[in-house]
Amino acid sequence: MGKVVERFSLFLNIAPIFVVIIPSFSLVEANTPEVVTNSGNSTKNIKSCNLFEGSWVIDNTYPLYNSTACPFIRKEFDCIKYGRTNLDYLKYRWQPKGCVLPRFDGKKFLKRYRGKKIMYIGDSLSLNNFESLLCLLHAAVPKAKFKQQINKQTVSVTFEDYGVEVILFHSNYLVDIEVQPNIGRVLKLNSMKNGRIWKEADVLIFNTWLWYLRADSKQPWDFVENNGTISKDMNRIEAFRIGLNTWAKWIETDVDTKKTKVFFQGASAMHYHGSEWGKPKIKNCFNETTPVKGSTYPSDLPIPVNIVKQVLKNMTKPVNLLDITKLSQLRKDGHPSIYNGLHGLDCTHWCIAGVPDTWNNILYASLFPISSKHSV
């Protein structure tokens, strides 16, 4: 059995925020679904099935694993360890309209991707997703040997019996931040130098958005550069659009999509205002124990959703959108809330086990074609 270093906590620099937590992190300190693609078409077997439309149903065979036995969960997501006693949130299964989501099979995943690299690139929501996949795989082969490595920007776990390496690459914006002499830290919206590392993986799952809204002392840059012009600041939504187009151009020119499958992890949901789910007197996700009923969420989709879909639509290479926004919006009950190692209120990230397991279950369904017997 491999050794986990304090569940990553010694290598993470997260300033506690006691009202709303959107933590930063530093790694040194610490079936075939209808997937939205740039072609606008579903993948080929079950054209009637959209895995991203549906509702949450009780399933007593859930959760998919015992989180207390998973050695990879960091303290921000370890809700049971930090006192959550209402565990109903673990019993919900995502039920798409028109088909059955195949159950995640960790052994099948490891065998099929023997000798391969799976890489998550993004912010702390990518970390949330990364640790979920590690728990799903570990639960399938609990006695398998694994090796963990922690570097400046990466955490990697290799399941040695299979040669499968799962990697988290920390990149809040995807584009670069560089320190320039006599200027300072510059967010370079047209530069993506880490791509030379990313493109060597066999599966890439990208995510970015939250950090584009950070301002003043909470942002990790002093100036922003676009097309050679350095400014003190700019419209953040436009900056996100430019950065995402830089990412898209890199995919188009540098990534061999015949070798590497590329996914973009859609916007997750936050639950700090009860008015968003039809309960204006509720202030946040604290004490929320059930999902929103049905398949409709009262509030609009987050800002980045349409931007991401438009960028993907304009691409020529195949990139799949893991369109998790709506299914996440319905899960107001799935956040750590106060049950985390920072002792603050977090309605941004997700408990593990929990909602990110469904994100990875849909990723699994995207990687493993399913037959028509799964349609209903």
Image (spheres, grey):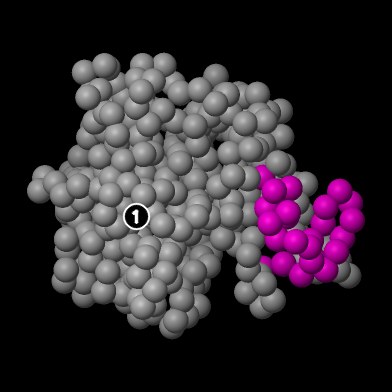
In-image side of 47 versus 352 (left or right):
right
Nearest the camera: 357 or 119? 357
Q: Which residue is mark 1?
A: 330
Nearest the camera: 327 or 293? 293
Nearest the camera: 348 or 289? 289
Residue 364 seen: no
Say if the magenta span includes residue 222: yes
Q: Secondary structure at mark 1?
A: loop
* x and y percentages locating residue 357 in the rendered image: 30, 47
Chain part drawn in magenta: 220-244
Say if the magenta span includes residue 250: no
Q: Residue at x 64, y 60 (%)?
A: 212
Q: The residue under label 1 is which amino acid type?
A: Leu
Q: Residue at x 27, y 69 (%)?
A: 288
* x and y percentages locating residue 351 in the rendered image: 31, 61
> Which image quadrant is residue 87 in?
bottom left
Quick check: 41 above or below 68? above
Residue 27 seen: yes
* x and y percentages locating residue 188 in the rendered image: 77, 54
